[in-house]
Image (cartoon, grey):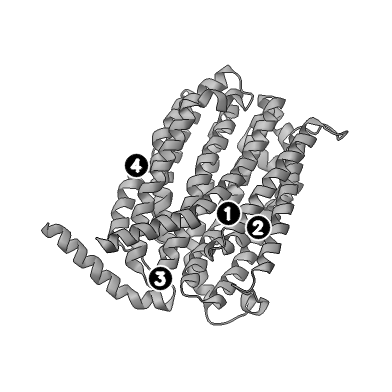
Amino acid sequence: MKREKNRGGMFLKAVITIALPIALQNLLATTASMVDTIMIGSQGELAVAAVGICAQISSLFFSCYYGFAGGAMLFFAQYWGARNTKGINKTFGVSFAFMLAVALAFCGMAVIRPEFLLEIYTDKSNIVAVAVPYIRIVGFAYPLQVIGVIISYLMRSTERVKAPLICSVTGLVVNFVLNWILIYGRFGMPKMGAAGAAVGTLMSAVVNLVMLCAFLLRGRSEVPLKLRDMFGRGDGFMKVYLGKCFPILCNEIFYGVGQMLINIVIGRQAESAIAAMAAFRVLEGFVFAFFGGLADASAVVVGKEIGAGSHMRGYQYVKKFALLCPAITFTICLTGLVFHGPLLGLFGLGAEALYYGKYMILIYLAAGTIRTCNYIMNNCYRAGGEAVFGTVLEISCLFALSVPATWVAGMVLHLPFLAVFAFLYTDEILRLIFELWYTRSGKWVKPVTEAGKAALPGFREELGRRRLSGRRR
């Protein structure tokens, strides 16, 4: 009993000291996007829809680099648990190189051929015309953002969570002030509309990165970064790294492609539906940011325990996070449903778009709660060293259920928009059944550190004893 109480206290401490700051940082990062969309709302539904389409491109960009970021989190957390600074250096160097390459590719496409990207997502030429200057400016922020992400993940994984939070707060303030000046043309500046919001996003990325680098240099005594260790050759690390990252990368890329196909369907709906979807995506992002931050924190906490060889503690943490995060999501969604009028009113939507928004939140109340549970468990599998099961399950369900169902509903049957929207989440219940079973099995504990590997047989034996004892009861 005392042991369980101690574990509960340690879990609560981990949530307060690690999870909440990370969740708040993610929340602030999403709030920056929310600020853009809300402040653009005064320019009308067309501008909201244009910024929403650009956000979908940024979402695809995220999917393409997050495989490396997620892999980095796995290695950072486990190496930190084993206090292996050389391993942390190698992970940082390799992840930095891959993520920057992806960012430069998207930057080039957004700056040079923005129309090509935008016309994939919508056939509305008036929306494309408004979106071009916005995405062209935001494209320059992509490389800055991924560098900020890998530095932030390094700090999170080594339990320096306050610095990224401070940087996010400052970046948000910069974004808000510049939006207010440039969107509306204050203090003699030109009235730039959507393009002004893009400038705010770019300058926010600059400030965030400069501050992160300053914090990183100031705290280099904890994890000294050395170019020789980051980019040195030999010892087979690249093979191990890519072996863990490849499934995550496939997961994120295929997921991004699946979401792109879904967004193509949405982009062919009425303009009021597209605007409502843009507003909903911001609210969904608000929810996702908070539970995504908790998911990242769970990866830090679980990965640290697995890397240190405390597998049973990490196993118990996963089960607790899988209950905590959906409960928080349900509470946030329920609050959003109660206050849907004022929330959606912030985006300058018309009557039809407001109607769509209300029922989209209602649908998400159930679907989002299940989705959160799936997401948190998959993130913990990765932290434990298992990246294949969650990838195969998520992508299989997405392309076997959600994508074809949404495509047929919207492009073939031309069902009402809310019916099309409901089909977006048809895969989540099936995933939940399989993931609950896999979480309980403990098969996802696959450490990459020597301490973790040495403790694995003992964990398997203890887990077997607990199951046998449970059956006898």
Viewer-nearest of labels 1 and 2?
A: 2
Q: Is residue 279 visible?
A: yes
Q: Eyeballing the image, is 124 above or below 459?
A: above
Which residue lies most toward the top here?
A: 351
The tag earlier along the polypeptide, 2 or 3, is 2
Residues tagged 1 and 2 counted as in contact (Cβ below 8 A): no
Q: Secondary structure at mark 4?
A: helix
Left or right: residue 184 compared with residue 242? right
Residue type at mark 1 is Cys
Disc ID at residue 429: 4
**To which quarter of the image does residue 309 belong?**
bottom left
Q: Nearer the viewer, residue 127 or 346?
A: 346
Viewer-nearest of labels 4 and 2?
A: 2
Label 4 crowd bin: few (<14), some (14–19), many (20+), radius 10 Å: some
Disc ID at residue 447: 3
Q: CA distance from mark 1 to mark 2?
A: 16 Å
Q: Nearer the viewer, residue 61 or 178?
A: 178
Q: Which residue occupies 34% across, 61% down?
A: 7
